Structures are given as C-alpha cells and as structure tokens.
C-alpha cells in the first residue's frame, strides 16, 4: 500500500482522503473509464486508501483491450502478405488473435514495425513506393485526430500505397451500455480527461440527464483522481447527478473544435464490436466513404473475416465492472503478462495487467 507521504502533495492528498471519508456514509461503486486511470488508482493504492468508502470498478477504456478479435485477425492476415509493411503501436504486437499474434507473424518473416505516430507510417509509405504500408488505427477519441490527419496527409501527398485498418471506439456509447446492463452496479463515473480534451465535457450531458448518474471528468494523477472521487461522492451523498469537470486545467466544455471538424470529415459513426463485450450500436468510427480508398479492410478484402472469443478469458466481465481480475480463474496462473490469454493482461493500460503488476493477487481484491 502506498502511503500518503509519497504523494506529490501529501497534505492535499490527506485533505482529500479526509473529505471523502467525512462525507461518505456508505461504500459507493464508482467506475473509472480509462485504463490509464485504472493503473494510476492501483499503482498509487487509492483503492486501498479508500477501501471503506469506494469500490473502484474498471471500465472499458483501454483501447488495446477492447479492440475486437476480428480486427486483430484482419491485421494478422494483412501482415502476412509479402508486399505489406504493417505499422502499429507496440502494445498491439502481443495481443493474441484467434491463433497467433503480430510478434509471431514478424518472427515468421512478416514486415511488422512499431511506430510512434501514424505520420511515421505515412513517411514509410513515401519511402517505400513499391510496398503497401498499412497502419493499425485503433483507440478512442483521443488517438483518432492523429489517425485522421495521417489519412488527410496521405491524400495530400498523393500516396496510393498507404491505408489504415480502422477500429476506433467511442466512450459515451460504451458508458451507456454499462448503465443499461441489468447487472450494472456503477453509481458514478470518473470520465477520462484526455478524451474530453478532444471531444469536450458536453458530450456527457445526455448520459447524466437520461441515467441520472454523476459523471466527473478527471485527470490521471492520484490527486486528480482523489479530487474526482470527492466530487462524485459528494454528489451521490446529496442525491445529485451532475456533470462536473475536475480537470479544468486541460478540458473545457467544447473540446478541440478543430480536431472535431477533421474527425467529422474523415470518419463516420458505425456499430462496433468491443472485445469480450460484443457489438455496441453507434460506438465506433470507420473511414468515411470519401476516404474509402484508404480503408485497408476493403483494399485487402478482409471485411468478412469473423472470429470466436476464447471462453477461458473473462475480460468482457472485467471491462464491464462485473468482476475484478483476480476473480478470473486463469488470473496469475494460466494467464500472466508473459503468457497472456486476453488483451487486458497484455496492455500497459489493462486492468488484469495492473492487478498483476501491483500485486493485487488475491480474491480479497475482488
Ligand atoms: S486474467 Fe487473463 S484470462 Fe482472465 S480476464 Fe484477464 S486477460 Fe482474460
């Protein structure tokens, strides 16, 4: 357990913990949406500091974790082709598909490269005019603007050998799906600040109104999270349900309007499958028809590919807040970061990886 004196501002941290303990009359179930927030909560022991006031359940906000199996299988099929350079962020290489992963494809001679920006992939396409360069474009509203810009840049440079395998997902429909589930226990959300930096806080107003659920936009530092929890618990105890911004140093109501315009031009909202969860209507982006020539699914004819989830991995239950990672029978035994069965154990933002890395190993952490 991490002690308060280890926080950057221990006095403020103690004040926030005291404020939460003073106002809470019961233990509230709060979902932090983003995997980065999950790791911060577990790494800094906020779940232990607030064990009597808050049960944290971990939401579907890790992009690698929710990328559907079909998308991984499509990437694997494309990466195996000799003319292709498949570019991806590093996390995706170890995510298991139905039979293998991108690392294994690379080991068998596939040209799979780790890049740090989608624009690196555009540059690779310019430098390799005889090769097909494909970027695996996944993630939430946060990463989408850079991916949109890569497609716009590829068109502006007249590149015909660049395409993108797009599997973007959107946060508000996923939160609505969590709330609509009959087994839902979530009473308030900590929403991810970086998503709101792009899309603005106002996108959550309809959810707050329709579900009467407090949503507090927070950052990722432990003090940000404590402040967000305090705001959420105060609302819950007062019977209020409001949209609050506890991350105003980075986020405003409207978000980044320029980025939103680029997204509107480049992507179209679509139904999207979430790994372990299933299809959530209107929860994804695909390339707009105007940019269909850059769609790798069409270019490499992998649209019809389907896949069956492993019954051994319960990541869908983890991502909906129904169980904690140690409650999965495979956790820490058959499934470890070295031998992952699911993406939530692979990703640096995955809840299973957080519990394993920071030694929340027993059922008492369920
Ligand atoms: S511990 Fe492994 S098998 Fe279990 S839910 Fe997490 S990733 Fe899936």
Image: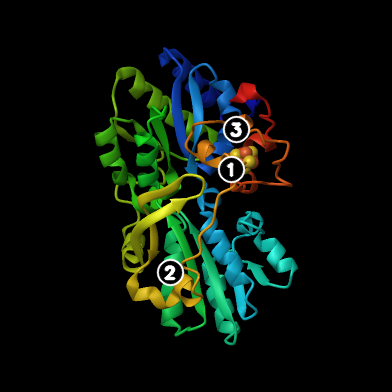
Residue 77 is situated, as x and y percent measured from the top left of the image, at 59, 69
Question: In what element is the residue under mark 1?
Answer: loop
Of the residues under marks 1 and 2, which one precedes in the sequence? 2
**Label 3 – label 1 distance at C-alpha:** 27 Å
Residue 75 is situated, as x and y percent measured from the top left of the image, at 57, 65
Of labels 1 and 2, the one closer to you: 1
Of the residues under marks 2 and 3, which one precedes in the sequence? 3
The residue tagged 2 is: 149
The residue tagged 3 is: 42
Residue 43 seen anywhere in this rendered image of the structure: yes
**Label 2 – label 3 distance at C-alpha:** 34 Å
Q: Residues within 10 Å of mark 2 (few under 14, many from 20)?
A: some
Q: Residues within 10 Å of mark 1 (few under 14, many from 20)?
A: few
Question: In what element is the residue under mark 2?
Answer: helix
Quarter of image, res 229: top left
> What's the residue at 51%, 36% (across, down)?
317
């Amino acid at each position: 357990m991490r002690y308060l004196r280890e926080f950057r501002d221990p006095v403020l941290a103690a004040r926030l913990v005291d404020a939460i303990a003073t106002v809470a009359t019961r233990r509230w179930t709060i979902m932090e949406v983003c995997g980065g927030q999950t790791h911060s909560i577990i790494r800094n022991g906020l779940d232990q500091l607030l064990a009597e006031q808050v049960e944290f359940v971990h939401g579907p906000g890790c992009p690698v974790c929710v990328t559907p199996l079909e998308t991984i299988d499509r990437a694997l099929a494309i990466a195996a082709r000799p003319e292709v350079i498949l570019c991806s962020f590093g996390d995706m290489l170890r995510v298991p598909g139905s039979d293998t992963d991108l690392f294994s494809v690379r080991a068998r001679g596939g040209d799979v490269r780790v890049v740090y920006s989608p624009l690196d992939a555009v540059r690779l396409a310019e430098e390799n005019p005889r090769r097909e360069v494909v970027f695996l474009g996944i993630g939430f509203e946060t990463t989408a603007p850079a991916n949109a810009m890569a497609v716009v840049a590829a068109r502006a440079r007249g590149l015909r050998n660049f395409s993108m395998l797009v599997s973007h997902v959107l946060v508000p429909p996923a939160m609505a799906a969590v709330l609509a589930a009959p087994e839902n226990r979530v009473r308030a959300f900590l929403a991810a600040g970086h998503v709101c930096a792009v899309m603005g806080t106002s996108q959550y107003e309809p959810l707050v109104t329709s579900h009467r659920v407090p949503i507090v936009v927070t950052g990722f530092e432990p003090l940000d999270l404590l402040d967000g929890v305090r705001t959420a618990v105060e609302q819950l105890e007062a019977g209020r349900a409001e949209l609050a911004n506890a991350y105003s140093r980075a986020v405003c109501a409207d978000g980044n309007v320029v980025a939103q315009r680029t997204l509107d031009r480049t992507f179209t909202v679509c139904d999207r499958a979430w790994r372990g969860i299933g299809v959530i209507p209107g929860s994804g982006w695909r390339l707009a028809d105007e940019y269909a020539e850059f769609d790798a699914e069409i270019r490499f004819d992998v649209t019809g590919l389907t896949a069956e989830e492993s019954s051994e991995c319960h990541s869908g239950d983890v991502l909906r807040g129904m169980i904690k990672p140690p409650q999965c029978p495979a956790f820490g035994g058959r499934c470890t970061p070295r031998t992952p069965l699911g993406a939530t154990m692979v990703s640096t933002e995955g809840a299973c990886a957080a519990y394993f890395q920071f030694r929340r190993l027993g059922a008492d952490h369920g």
